[in-house]
Amino acid sequence: MKLDLDLDLFTYTGTGPLRLAEFPHRLDRPVYDGKRDYRRRLKEFASEIDGLQSMMYAHDRYAMLLIFQAMDAAGKDGTIAHVMRGVNPHGIRVHSFKKPSSEELDHGFLWRTNKAMPERGRVTIFNRSYYEEVLVAKVHPKIVTDYQRLPRADTEDLEPLWQGRYRSIRELEAYLHGNGTRVVKFFLNVSKDEQRKRFLRRIDEPEKNWKFSEADVAERKHWDAYMGAYSDCISETSTPDCPWYVVPADDKKSMRLIVSKIVLSRMAALELHYPEVSDERRAALSKYRKALEAE
């Protein structure tokens, strides 16, 4: 499926200073020509992703971990649902990480996500992830000092702790990459004004009332702190093997198509193929075919 768009516009590999403010919230023009074209493109992308994922399962050498991070109302849930619609659910798993349980708090910050990593041949999607521990926890450090009971959390200077977590994340993702899991990380870059409009729609439209949370509005007061935390996080954890993709999120349809193209391009780069059949196996299959035809 062809979409004339340079993915380098959204890619940060850690090779140079990150200026999050330079990444757009909306493209100059949509990447689709009307709703019908959008639906057609999205469907074709999903079909190609499904074909490659089936081949990935048969190839049994690679896995893929898709990580979605964003401010509230950026569209994580909808993007995951639309991009993966039509893809065989046999090879897809989605994990949504909420507030840690007491058991999870009694382990290291990577423990609960490590249990959910994909097997070879499968795609796992993290709706939020271990990155919350350098985002929400950094904006609200009492999460660390009051609840996580860490040896170094009784000091006023938490910078060594954040640097240690960045290092642990880089090492984890390098380990995953070396063992065949491709880590694809998305920051859905919604603007503060667009978030406000979406919150208002959640209040005004009865069918969206359930989505509205007073806590989400309270977090808007920390917008600048979150942008700083995201800038630091993306800067510290982007590598050529495991880059971040900063995707404009004010136009949901364009965002979904861009995410689809990135997923498809990363899967296509794996050079997947179905297992080769030996001459002996081919002869056996021919024998079984004749037997079935004779029934």
Image (tube, rainbow, N blue to C red):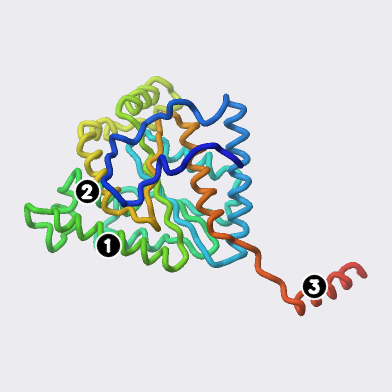
Looking at the image, which residue is at 19% across and 50% down?
143
Residue 136, position as x, y percentages in the image: 24, 45
State the residue lying farthest toward the bottom. 280
Separation of residues labelled 3 and 2 (CA atoms): 57 Å
Q: Badge 2: few (under 14), some or many (20 or more) residues near its Cα, within 10 Å?
A: some
Separation of residues labelled 2 and 1 (CA atoms): 16 Å
- Tell me which amino acid carries mark 2: Ala
- Tell me which amino acid carries mark 3: Leu
Relative height, residue 39 to residue 177 (above, below): above
Q: Badge 3: few (under 14), some or many (20 or more) residues near its Cα, within 10 Å?
A: few
Q: Secondary structure at mark 1?
A: helix
Residue 105, position as x, y percentages in the image: 25, 58
Q: Which residue is mark 1?
A: 168
Q: Quadrant of the N terminus?
A: top right
Disc 2 versus disc 1: nearer the observer: 1
Q: Earlier in the sequence, mark 2 or mark 1?
A: 2
Looking at the image, which residue is at 39% across and 45% down?
11
Disc 3 versus disc 2: nearer the observer: 3
Separation of residues labelled 3 and 1 (CA atoms): 49 Å
Question: Can you tell which mark lies on residue 114?
Answer: none
Q: Quadrant of the C terminus?
A: bottom right
- Tell me which amino acid carries mark 1: Ser
Residue 91, position as x, y percentages in the image: 56, 56
> Which image quadrant is residue 176 in?
bottom left
Q: Which residue is mark 3?
A: 285
230 or 28: nearer the viewer: 28
State the residue lying farthest toward the top. 204
Q: Secondary structure at mark 2?
A: helix
